[in-house]
Image: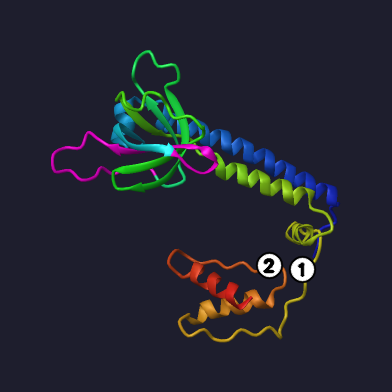
Amino acid sequence: MPTQRSETEHINELYHLKGLLKIEKQADYEYFKTLILNKPLEERRAEGFTWYPVVVTQSGYTYGERAYVVIERGGLAEGQKEIPHQFRAGNVVNLFTQQSDVYQGAYHGTVHYINKNSMRIVLNTKDLPDWLSGGQIGADMLFDEKTYIEMEKALEKVIHAKRNRLAELRDILLGHQLPSPYSTNAFAPEIAHLNPSQNAAIQDILANKDVAIIHGPPGTGKTTTLVQAIKQL
């Protein structure tokens, strides 16, 4: 049954959640600083959070006139093809130099792709660093706040939704409104390559107009089930 709380109380609950998200983000950043940023270069390099030294093999300009560089990791032992690292496509990174007398020795960017010991970085600038050919260059992994930004945006949309489907789902999930009745007439064909519990999950999704929660341990085929459910919908 819906609770007797007012809609204002529900909205305040979401604002409280937004405040908790900011606290979590700050705690996450402090942990990242302790784990990575405050460590010496050699430790960061050994743990795979820094590539150093690197050689710039290509540079230029890409979409939106943003500059890019392709770097290749050096410092490999003879016969060593690869060193484990933590970098992934989409990571926010800091391209830096340890050359002396450099005006701006660091540029932020995003990893476009990684291929073994090569990395393409799209910089957050239209200008290429003037120290690319001078050596002593490296790349640090930075704290990535994109996930938090997207969650904050999503909460703002939910908070300010009015008289639309998002507002309706918000009120249902927060107990302000009853969900639609479970449909006993919903039909989903048996999908041959899914097991009985996966087929039952799809049936449950189709029978619920508002929300169906599908859960299961890793490896039980949740993603496969959701793909098939989307096809049915």
Q: Is residue 133 visible?
A: yes
191 up-or-down from 65: above or below: below
Magenta stretch contains residue 45: no
Under mark 2, the amino acid is Val
> Which residue is the site of mark 1?
179
Compared across the picture, whether 219 is left or right of 145 comes to: left
Disc 2 + disc 1, Cβ < 8 Å: yes
| Foreground residue among 4 and 144 | 144
- The residue that label 2 is drawn on is 211
The answer to which of marks 2 and 1 sits earlier in the sequence is 1
In the displayed structure, would residue 105 be above or below residue 191?
A: above
In what element is the residue under mark 1?
loop
Label 2 SS: loop
Q: Read off the magenta span.
A: 61-87
**Residue at x-position 76% and y-position 48%:** 159
Q: Residue furthest top?
A: 101
Whole-angstrom CA distance, mark 2 to mark 1, is 8 Å
* Depth check, front residue: 107 or 233: 107
Residue 136: quarter of image: top left
